[in-house]
Image: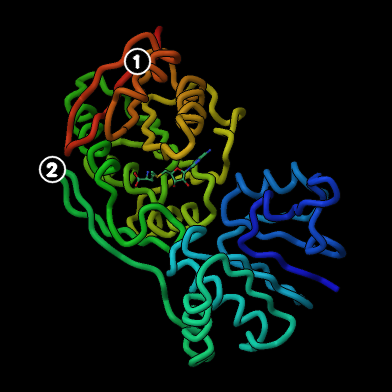
Amino acid sequence: MKTLLVGYRAQDLFEKGRRGKLQPSPIVDGDVTCHALDIYHRHAIEKALHVKAICSAHLPGGPWDVIRFKTGPKLMSGELALDMLQEISRLTGGDLKSPRFHLDFDGKERDRNALLEKVLDDPTRIRDFSATWCASVPGAEPIELTSYPGCFCHRRADDGGLALAEVVSRELNAWEARPAPLKFLDMGCGCGLVGFLVASAVKGVELVMVDSHSRAIEAANVNAKKLGIPVEAILADNGTPARMDGTFDVFAGNPPYYSDYRIAEVFLETALRALKPGGLCYTVVKNDAGLKPVQERYFPSVEVIRRRGYCVLKSIKPV
Ligand SMILES: C[S@@+](CC[C@H](N)C(=O)[O-])C[C@H]1O[C@@H](n2cnc3c(N)ncnc32)[C@H](O)[C@@H]1O
């Protein structure tokens, strides 16, 4: 019996046993594969349990005897839930009512039914959840970017990312002794907003992008092809230590801040490893009070540049 678990995090795969001790849940019994969109979640599952875990932008083909899908308004956007459910519907031959499919919905019954109805109404209808939108920095032509549900930012440019791209483009264009080509690392690239905007405004930029989310990497590759801007897009959650080898001229990152700066620290460690001596590190945050002391632990000084209501934090790797 081959089972595919979709949307489960490591902590969802345990339950309380006798005396409140955590033990593996029965849903991981047998031939189970866990799917994760983010490689961080794949690694967390593999660390917690001996089950197969894969990270990919789309669900693996199967065939599967059972598919279990965990979702709910606090776990993912409605659009991502619908997109995943549509993929599951395809894998089950449109039969979401069969006992082979289990929806583990963390939320109200009426929201659960509304989600199911959207796909059950017409299982043959394939909705395209991708979005294509424009972004630009001053002095350069607008570029078109495509994004997918689950990928940051979907359907619109993030103001923090725009502030970062604007400051970095302006500074690099003003840098008279700028290396050519200029090796540029966009960490936490999402669909590639920052890197592609900088490459659209500054000549001779050689782009490497890293993100832990499979759909971000898919979007970055699609956008690179559409824009005709070559990029090496890497799926990783640990900054890819071997690849970050002290050869980059510039690092830019718009890290997520939901983890009390833990992820921002992964970004800064990567910046320090990736940059050449004299290389430039730029991060962005709404309010610099929290991130500035963290960045000062990695770099000797931090300059704060304000833009669009955000703070871009600039540091130089010591020579
Ligand atoms: C705030 S978004 C920024 C996206 C894009 N650069 C922008 O400005 O619109 C942060 C990105 O970091 C990615 N991320 C989170 N943890 C990561 C990690 N450990 N390594 C690489 N990327 C990570 C997320 O998947 C997300 O795409």
Q: Residue at x 38, y 57 (%)?
A: 223
Residue 49: x %, y % from top left = 79, 48
Is residue 36 toward the left or the right of residue 301 in the image? Answer: right
Q: Residue at x 36, y 54 (%)?
A: 153
Q: Which residue is mark 2?
A: 138
Residue 276 in the image: above or below residue 222: above
Q: Nearer the viewer, residue 169 or 311?
A: 311
Colour pattern of the rendering? rainbow
Q: Nearer the viewer, residue 194 or 59?
A: 59
Q: Residues within 10 Å of mark 2 (few under 14, many from 20)?
A: few
Where in the image, quadrant-wise, is ligand 1 located?
top left
Residue 63: x %, y % from top left = 76, 77
Residue 177: x %, y % from top left = 24, 18
Q: Residues within 10 Å of mark 1 (few under 14, many from 20)?
A: many
Task: Report the residue that reaches farthest toward the left.
Answer: 139
Q: Nearer the viewer, residue 233 or 5?
A: 5
Tell me the CA gap for discs 2 and 1.
24 Å
Q: Which residue is mark 1?
A: 316
Q: Secondary structure at mark 2?
A: loop
Residue 212: x %, y % from top left = 54, 45
Task: Report the residue that reaches farthest toward the front.
Answer: 19
Q: Residue at x 47, y 81 (%)?
A: 114
